[in-house]
Image (cartoon, rainbow, N blue to C red):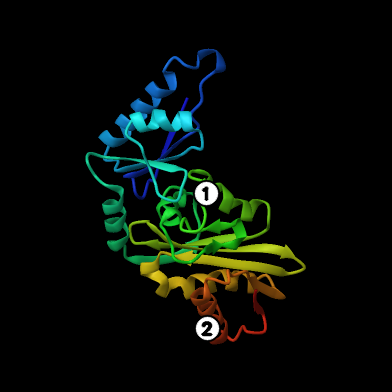
C-alpha cells in the first residue's frame, strides 16, 4: 500500500506516504512498483511536485531510482515533472502568489504548507508551539506529518492555528496559539520573507483569538538570533495597546 495526497486547491502539489509491504513479501519490488505507479499517475494528471519524507537510507535509494531528489536542509525528497528544477519551481510558486485571506487553518492546507515550511527562512525559530525551525538551522524531518503537528494544538492543547492564504490557496504564513493553562497562551508564527508585511496581522489574529478567551498573559518565545522578529512583535503589541498583556522571552 501507499497513498498520494493531492491538494484540491493546488492539484499540482502532492505528498506520498504510508508506504507499507507485508513482511512476508518484502524484497520483491512491490513497494517500488506501487510507488512508480503513483508517480506516473500524479505526473500524468498535471502534477508538478510530489513530496515525501524518509529517514531510511535504503528507502531513499529506491526513491532516487524513481526520480526523487533530496531537498536541502531536510529529510524530504521531491519528484518533479519533466526536467523542472525545484529551485526554479518554488521561486515562481511564491513570486506569483497574491495574499488574500487570513483564516483558521483547514485540512486543505496540509500539502501547501510543506513548501512554506521547508523554504530556508532567515528566522531561526519559525514556531515555538510545535518546535519548528528554519531548515537553515535544523534539519526538517516532517512532510505529511506537518499538518498533524499543528492540528495537535487544537485536539490536545486547547489552541488554534491560522493561515495566510493566497488567492489560489497557497499557504504564505502561519500563526498559532497554544493554551498553557491558567488563561496563559503562547503565540508564534512566520511568513514567507516576501510577505513579511502580513506577519503582524497574522500574529494579531492569533492574539485576538487568545484575548477572546480572556487570556491573562500571552507569551512569545523568540530566538535571541531573531531580533527583527522580536521587534515586529513588540511594535505590534504597542500598536494594539497590548504591551501589558504580551510578554516576549
Q: Name which quarter of the figure residue 38 lies in.
A: top left
Q: Residue furthest left?
A: 83
Residue 68, x across and y down, in percent? 35, 36
Question: Pointer 2: what residue?
Answer: 235
Which residue occupies the foreground of this view, 116 or 202? 116
Q: Name which quarter of the figure residue 159 lies in.
A: bottom right
Q: How far apart are the two marked residues, 1 and 2, measured between alpha carbons?
A: 29 Å
Looking at the rendered structure, the secondary structure element under dot 2 is: helix
Task: Point out the image quarter for the C terminus.
Answer: bottom right
In screen coordinates, is 51 left or right of 208?
left
Examine the rendered structure and indicate whether residue 100 appears above or below residue 21: below
Q: Which mark is residue 127?
A: none
Q: Residue at x 41, y 71 (%)?
A: 196
Examine the rendered structure and indicate whether residue 17 appears above or below residue 210: above
In screen coordinates, is 217 left or right of 104?
right
Residue 111, x across and y down, in percent? 43, 47
How many neighbours does mark 2 have within 10 angstroms: few (below 14), some (14-19), or many (20 or more)? some
Looking at the rendered structure, the secondary structure element under dot 1 is: helix
Residue 201, x across and y down, in percent? 48, 74
Q: Which mark is residue 146?
A: 1
Amino acid at each position: 500500500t501507499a497513498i498520494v495526497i493531492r491538494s484540491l486547491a493546488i492539484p499540482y502539489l502532492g505528498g506520498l506516504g504510508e508506504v507499507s509491504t507485508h513482511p512476508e513479501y518484502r524484497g520483491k519490488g512491490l513497494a517500488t512498483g506501487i510507488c512508480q505507479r503513483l508517480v506516473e499517475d500524479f505526473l500524468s494528471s498535471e502534477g508538478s511536485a510530489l513530496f515525501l519524507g524518509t529517514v531510511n537510507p535504503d528507502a531513499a535509494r529506491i526513491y532516487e531510482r524513481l526520480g526523487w531528489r533530496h531537498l536541502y536542509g531536510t529529510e524530504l525528497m521531491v519528484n518533479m515533472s519533466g526536467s523542472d528544477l525545484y529551485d526554479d519551481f518554488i521561486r515562481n510558486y511564491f513570486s506569483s502568489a497574491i495574499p488574500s485571506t487570513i483564516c483558521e487553518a483547514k485540512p486543505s492546507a496540509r500539502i501547501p504548507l510543506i513548501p512554506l515550511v521547508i523554504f530556508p527562512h532567515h528566522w531561526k525559530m519559525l514556531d515555538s508551539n510545535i518546535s519548528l525551525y528554519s531548515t537553515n538551522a535544523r534539519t526538517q524531518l516532517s512532510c505529511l506529518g506537518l499538518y498533524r503537528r499543528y492540528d495537535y494544538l487544537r485536539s490536545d492543547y486547547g489552541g488554534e492555528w491560522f493561515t495566510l492564504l493566497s488567492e489560489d490557496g497557497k499557504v504564505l504564513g502561519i500563526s498559532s496559539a497554544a493554551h498553557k493553562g491558567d488563561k496563559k497562551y503562547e503565540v508564534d508564527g512566520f511568513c514567507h520573507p516576501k510577505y513579511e508585511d502580513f506577519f503582524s496581522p497574522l500574529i494579531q489574529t492569533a492574539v485576538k483569538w487568545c484575548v477572546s478567551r480572556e487570556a491573562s498573559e500571552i507569551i512569545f518565545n523568540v530566538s535571541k538570533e531573531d531580533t527583527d522578529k522580536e521587534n515586529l512583535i513588540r511594535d505590534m503589541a504597542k500598536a494594539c495597546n497590548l504591551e501589558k498583556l504580551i510578554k516576549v522571552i
